[in-house]
């Protein structure tokens, strides 16, 4: 199975202050706004992290799925793990395994050139899992949710180099890890991790009172002192290895 982490999405009550906090603290640039998300009563912005992305979505209407998710988890935080399949056949295999396990397709769109698919967060327990395919089959470049290729000129890796891991939490992390491993068609390691091409999915016990969710990401960084200084200014500093911004944890490892 060939699958690549390309994007994680956060959900926030208000978009602009979170984008400002992330951009300033992490030293990364906004690179794409997808006006199409207004269909779901949302606004969004993507920030470039190497060849991948952090997205923030925020409701602009009442009674949206994102708004209900904010209420259920008690505020801002992680929302979606978004991956790219190496081929359409591999994506369809994930789809078939999900349906066989009783996981609902929350939304999908298929054309002759691409297929976007979101698996329901309640059935995936911790968050949406989106697995997309497009005809370019380019893990390092073209990415339709970021508008193709124009984002590349806006990427700055002098501070943050890459996303290398995702943290998902639940009351039974072993059950959660087994479930995600089964859907992805990958082995679960003894330390409750699942390895995909460019990242490690880590499954941990939920201890913060917020229940199951996408709780953090692992980042490799080139300028940890600068990041930590800015984090202290924005009251995002937790330790020299961790920041918390908008209810979401960022774990830092120097390259």
Image (tube, rainbow, N blue to C red):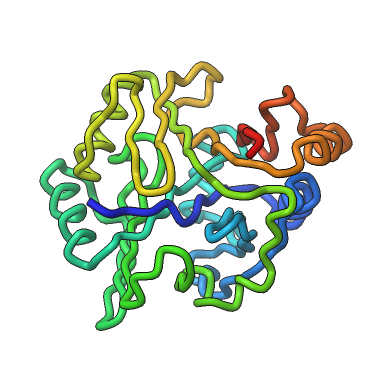
Q: Residue at the bottom extreme?
A: 112
Q: Residue at x 59, y 40 (%)?
A: 219
Q: Residue at x 32, y 34 (%)?
A: 194
Answer whether residue 215 is visible to the viewer in this image: yes
Q: Residue at x 61, y 36 (%)?
A: 248
Q: Residue at x 47, y 33 (%)?
A: 167
74 relative to 110 in the view: left or right: right
Give above or below for 17 relative to 188.
below
Q: Nearer the viewer, residue 5 or 170?
A: 5
Q: Residue 155: x, y in percent?
A: 67, 64
Quadrant in the picture for the C terminus: top right
Q: Residue 184: x, y in percent?
A: 24, 45
Q: Residue 94: x, y in percent?
A: 20, 52
Give above or below for 186 relative to 84.
above
Q: Residue at the left extreme?
A: 100
Answer whether residue 57 is visible to the viewer in this image: no
Q: Nearer the viewer, residue 125 or 200?
A: 200
Tell me the quarter of the picture where residue 239 sits: top right
140 relative to 238 in the view: left or right: left
Q: Residue at the front extreme?
A: 255
80 relative to 24 in the view: left or right: left
Q: Residue 33: x, y in percent?
A: 62, 70
109 relative to 254 in the view: left or right: left
């Amino acid at each position: 199975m060939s699958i690549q982490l390309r994007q994680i999405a956060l959900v926030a009550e208000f978009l602009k202050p979170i984008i400002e906090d992330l951009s300033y603290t992490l030293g990364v640039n906004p690179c794409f706004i997808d006006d199409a998300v207004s269909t779901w009563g949302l606004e969004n912005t993507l920030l470039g992290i190497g060849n991948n992305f952090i997205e923030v979505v925020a409701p602009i209407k009442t009674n949206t799925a994102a708004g209900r998710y904010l209420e259920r988890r008690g505020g801002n935080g992680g929302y979606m793990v978004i991956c790219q399949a190496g081929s359409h056949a591999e994506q369809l295999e994930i789809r078939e395994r999900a349906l066989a396990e009783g996981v609902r397709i929350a939304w999908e769109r298929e054309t002759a050139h691409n297929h976007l698919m979101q698996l329901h967060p309640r059935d995936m327990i911790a968050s949406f899992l989106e697995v997309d395919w497009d005809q370019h089959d380019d893990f390092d470049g073209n990415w339709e949710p970021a508008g193709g290729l124009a984002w590349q000129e806006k990427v700055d890796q002098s501070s943050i180099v890459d996303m290398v891991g995702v943290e998902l939490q639940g009351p039974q992390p072993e059950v959660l890890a087994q479930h995600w491993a089964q859907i992805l068609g990958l082995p679960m390691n003894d330390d409750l991790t699942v390895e995909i091409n460019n990242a490690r999915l880590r499954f941990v016990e939920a201890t913060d009172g917020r229940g199951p969710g996408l709780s953090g990401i692992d980042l490799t960084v080139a300028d940890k002192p600068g990041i930590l200084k800015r984090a202290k200014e924005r009251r995002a500093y937790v330790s020299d290895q961790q920041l918390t911004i908008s209810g979401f944890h960022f774990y830092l490892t120097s390259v």
